């Protein structure tokens, strides 16, 4: 059994125990450095990373194959990769790039089974007369039309 298969099995077991956590990505480099990126329905704590790390590390034998292990959260600025990441970001501002290269910065209002709803305000010319007026905009974007989406961090 290869190291990658062993680690994948251990990750799967860990997520059976910690059901609010899920895998974003994991890689194993040529020198056996294992990097596991996780996220959670309510975010990820340091203790979550420790628990997943222990679930993997305590079930691998360094005598059999030496390795280094890193378990980390996806990070606040990392792009959203899985549909499961969207609901916890409702109410936050996202930067979305569609497959048609349209860029939208807006608030995530809701998440459906196959799309998201974004809302924002824009200044547009008045229909009659001079000047501009602020209008509410809304876009419903299917998941398969999202090229990249990330949370905009504001202070």
Image (cartoon, rainbow, N blue to C red):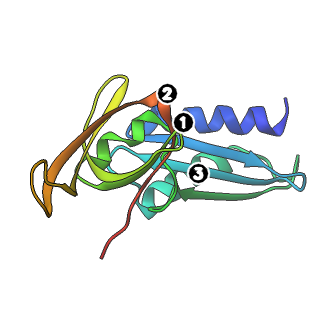
Looking at the rendered image, the disc whose residue lies closer to the viewer, 3 or 2, is: 2
| Label 1–label 2 contact, CB within 8 A | yes
Q: Residue 139: x and y, percent?
A: 29, 37
Q: Secondary structure at mark 1?
A: loop
Q: Secondary structure at mark 2?
A: helix
Residue in the picture at 88% in, 46% down: 64
Q: Residue 58: x and y, percent?
A: 66, 49
Query: Tag 1: Cα neighbours inside 10 Å, few (<14), some, or many (≥20)?
Result: few
| Label 3–label 2 contact, CB within 8 A | no
Query: Tag 2: Cα neighbours inside 10 Å, few (<14), some, or many (≥20)?
Result: few
Looking at the rendered image, the disc whose residue lies closer to the viewer, 3 or 1, is: 1
Q: Assign the C terminus to one quadrant of the image.
A: bottom left
- Tell me the distance, in whole angstroms, between the alpha carbons under discs 1 and 2: 8 Å
Sequence-first disc among 3 and 2: 3
Task: Using residue 109 as the reference point, say whether residue 2 is left or right of it.
Answer: right
Q: Which residue is mark 2?
A: 144
Q: Which residue is mark 1?
A: 99
């Amino acid at each position: 059994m290869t190291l990658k298969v062993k680690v994948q099995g251990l990750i799967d077991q860990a997520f059976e125990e910690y059901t609010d956590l899920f895998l974003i990505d994991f890689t194993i480099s040529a020198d056996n450095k294992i990097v596991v990126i996780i996220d959670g329905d309510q975010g990820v704590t340091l203790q979550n990373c420790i628990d997943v790390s222990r679930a993997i590390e305590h079930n691998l034998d360094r005598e059999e194959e030496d390795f280094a292990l890193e378990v980390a959260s996806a990070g606040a600025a990392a792009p959203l990769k899985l549909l499961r990441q969207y609901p916890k970001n409702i109410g936050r501002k996202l930067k979305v790039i569609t497959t048609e290269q349209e860029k939208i910065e807006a608030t995530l209002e809701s998440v459906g089974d196959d799309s998201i709803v974004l809302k924002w305000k824009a200044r547009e010319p008045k229909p009659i007369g001079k000047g501009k007026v602020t209008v509410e905009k809304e876009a419903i974007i299917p998941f398969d039309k999202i090229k990249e989406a990330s949370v905009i961090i504001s202070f």
